[in-house]
Amino acid sequence: SSPLYFYSDIIKAIENTKLEIETARNLFNIVYDENLIEMAIYLEEAAKKRLEYLIALAKEKGIIVSTQYILYQCINMSE
C-alpha cells in the first residue's frame, strides 16, 4: 500500500474523529437522562483520546495539509 493512501487514511480518520467529538457534544446538549449524559461524556472523551493518538501519528509520519485543503474542507462543511 502506498504511503500516500496511508496518509490520506490518517487525515480522514482525524476528520471523522473531530465529527465524532462534535456529535457527542451535540448529544450531551440535547439529552436529559443521566445515563445518556454519561454516555455522551464517555463518547467525547474516547474520541478525544483517539484524536490525540491520530495527531501524534500524523506528526510522527510528517503529515501536513495545505491551507488550500483546509479551506476546501471548511467550504464543503458549510454547504
Image (cartoon, rainbow, N blue to C red):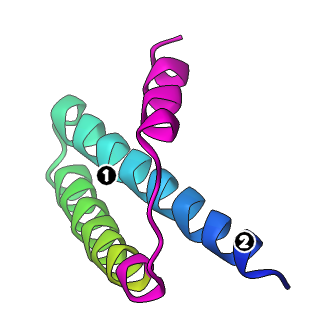
Label 2 sits on what residue type? Leu
Above or below, 66 relative to 68 = below
**What span is colored magenta in the figure?**
58-79
**Relative horizontal placement of residue 22, taking residue 14 as reference (left or right):** left
* x and y, in percent, of residue 26 in the image: 27, 35
Foreground label between 1 and 2: 2
**Relative horizontal placement of residue 15, taking residue 6 as reference (left or right):** left
Task: Specify few, some or many for label 1: CA neighbours under 10 Å numbering under 14, 14-19, or 20 or more.
Answer: many
The number of discs equals: 2
In the image, residue 74 lies in the stretch drawn in magenta: yes
* Helix, strand or loop under label 1: helix
Above or below, 17 relative to 6 = above
Residue at the image position 33 percent from the left and 66 percent from the top = 47
Above or below, 33 relative to 57 = above
Q: Is the magenta stretch mostly helix, strand or loop?
A: helix
Residue ID for mark 1: 21
Task: Specify few, some or many for label 2: CA neighbours under 10 Å numbering under 14, 14-19, or 20 or more.
Answer: few
Q: Are marks 1 and 2 in contact (CB under 8 Å)?
A: no
Q: Which of 46 and 13 is in front in this view?
A: 13
Query: Which quarter of the rendering shows the C terminus?
Result: top right
Numbered tag placed on residue 67 in the rendering: none
Label 1 sits on what residue type? Ile
First of labels 1, 2 by sequence position: 2
Above or below, 53 relative to 63 = below
Numbered tag placed on residue 4 in the rendering: 2
Residue at the image position 31 percent from the left and 52 percent from the top = 21
Q: In which quarter of the image is residue 52?
A: bottom left
* x and y, in percent, of residue 41 in the image: 18, 59
* x and y, in percent, of residue 56 in the image: 32, 82
**Relative horizontal placement of residue 71, taking residue 3 as reference (left or right):** left
Residue at the image position 46 percent from the left and 47 percent from the top = 66
